[in-house]
Every structure is written in C-alpha cells, then in structure tokens.
Image: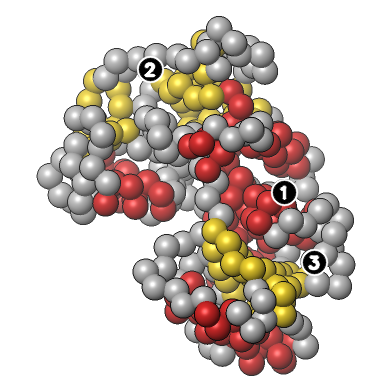
Amino acid sequence: MKALGYTQNGPIDGVGALRLIEVDHPQLGPRDLLVAVKGISVNPVDVKLRAVSAPEADFGILGYDAAGTVIGTGTEVTGYSIGDEVFYAGDVTRDGTNCEFHAVDERIVGRKPATLDFVESAGLPLTSITAWEMLFDSFRLTEGGGKGQSLLVVGGAGGVGSILIQLAKTLTNLTVIATASRPETEEWVRKMGADHVVNHHDDLAAQMESLGLVSTYVAALTATDQHWPAIVNLIAPRGHIALIDDPENLDISPAKPKALTISWEFMFTRSMFDTDDILVQRDLLNRVSEMIDTGTLQSTVTERAEALTVETLTDTKGAGF
C-alpha cells in the first residue's frame, strides 16, 4: 500500500522530511480494526513529531486523525463489523493514518457522523477528544454543571478551542469567554457560542474585570508561557488551569497563594498506556458523532485539500484530505 511519511526529522523542506513510498499492509492485533482510510487531517502533533523525533524504523508514518471504512477485524473485536464507517485519532505509539490502510484499536474508534463526509469527519476526533477530556476529566465538570461559573478559553479560534466552546455551551452551564485577536476570529468564536470575547494581545485581567467575571476554569491552548502571569492573576482562588501546549519554562509558584490546580491534557494518554478506562474515547466519539448528526455541534473544518501528496502536505497548515 502507499504511505506518506518521513525518514529523517527536521524542517518540512529538509531531506527525508516527506516521502511517498510502498509499505506492507499493517498487521492486526486481537482488538484491531483494519480501516480503508478515506479522509485524514493535519494537526500540530504531526508537525511536532516530524520536526523533533526521528522515526523508530527506517520510515515513519504520521497522521493522527482519520475516517474510513472497516475492511478487516482482529480476533477479539466486538464493537464493529466489516463495512462500518468510523472516525478516530489513532495512537502516537503506532503508525499514523497517512496511508491507504490503517490498523487501530477498536476501543478508541467512534462511528463516523452520518451527516458529514469522510474528509470533514476526519477533522474532528483529535480536537473533540482533547476538548471533551479537558472539560470532564481535567476540570471534572459534570454535564449540566458549572452554573454560576465561567471558563476562559485562551486561543478560542483554534481547532480545540472551537470544539471546547461548543461542548461547554451545549453540555454545561458555564459562561464561556474566548480570546481572539482579529475581527474574523472574533466572529468565529462567537459563531461557536462564546458568550464574551477578549483580545489576548491586550490586558486579559483588565478585560475580564470590565466584564465583571472571574474565571473558575482556564483552558490554556496556546502561548501559555506568554499569558501565564495574566492567567494566574485573573483566575479565581482554587481555580483550575488546564493546558495542551509545551511551554519551555513555566513558573508555577505564583499559583500557590490561590491554591490553583494545574494540569496537562494529552488525548493520547489512554491509548499510549492502555488505561483501564480506554473505552471512554469510543464513547465520547460516539456522543460527538450523535451531536453532529442532530445539529447540536457543528464541524470546525475550514480548509480542504483534494489529494494527500507530498506537495499538499507540505503546503497545508491544517487541512482535511
């Protein structure tokens, strides 16, 4: 089968950064599905891994979002059958989805939304899982909870932020404040459902004060190190900050007087460590799929490329294929 991957880490235009080659079909484990991949998307994790991590074998296949059709099953698969249409975010410890056929553990796979095509469906899993886990695992909110409390989403116009705003407004009673710095991104986060918008290039604490709001929860999705002093300043005592990026230096000592909780969200943890609750990811993807089909959630895919090639993958900054 054809696969698109890399032989050497480094910049995107470096030697061996991206190659299209023929590789063997994947071998299935007992709980694996063999999926004919019909849509993938590009996420920051693809860029980060290719830039800094050399492939473990001679050739590394990236891609951590996919939608496709089940064409084979392992001996212990119980949740899916051949012909089922699925979507999922994969596992960073295994080959990625930038290939014709892909093996994935059925426990982290959801049923593709019926109202979306494969490409648009492939743009949802990683961001949806991240946002869902941040709300209900990191913040430990319950559906219908959060009344009288607020959530600040730093970087609200990104993929995770766009889903997080929708989930928070749909499944909780939180007041949602999102950051955006341009007219088009401000319009976007309002479309996603944000109650208020503040500019992350200006004084966040002052803007929150003008709204008369003190956030109990902060989702720090981008440039956390740059916004850290403001986040600690504006959050409520005993509040919770969850982040997904990788700040080089983060001094958490200013958080002590407020007894803040600080946590990382990493949606690959369950698959990496085969946690006891790994099936949570299947369940939440199925919920997301249902919410898409009922119109409760809307797709966040804004760019599409028609073919997965070295050229299109080099040019894209986050398209679906």
Q: Label 1 sits on what residue type?
A: Leu
Could you tell me residue 45's position as x and y percent?
A: 41, 49
Q: Which part of the image, by quadrant, shows the C terminus?
A: top left
Q: From mark 1 to mark 2, how far is it between C-alphas?
A: 34 Å
**In which quadrant of the rendered view does residue 311 lie?**
top left
Residue depth check, mark 1 versus mark 3: number of the one nearer the observer: 3
Question: Label 3 crowding class (10 Å Cα cut-off): few <14, some 14-19, many 20+?
Answer: many
Question: In the drawing, what numbered circle is on residue 26?
Answer: 2
Q: Earlier in the sequence, mark 1 or mark 2?
A: 2
Q: Secondary structure at mark 3?
A: loop
Q: Earlier in the sequence, mark 3 or mark 2?
A: 2
Q: Is residue 125 left or right of residue 249?
A: right
CB under 8 Å between discs 1 and 2? no
The image shows residue 221 at horizontal and vertical percentages of: 53, 64
- Mark 3 sits on what residue? 174
Give the residue drawn at x 39%, y 14%: 27
* Left or right: 218 in relation to 295: left
Quarter occupied by residue 3:
top left
Residue 297: numbered disc: 1
Q: Residue at x 86, y 56 (%)?
A: 144
- Could you tell me how far apart the alpha carbons at marks 1 and 3 are, in whole angstroms? 17 Å
User: Counting other residues with Cα less than 10 Å from the Cα at mark 2, is it few (<14), some (14-19), or many (20 or more)?
Assistant: few
Asked if residue 37 shows in the view, the reply is yes
Q: Looking at the image, which residue sits at the far top?
A: 75
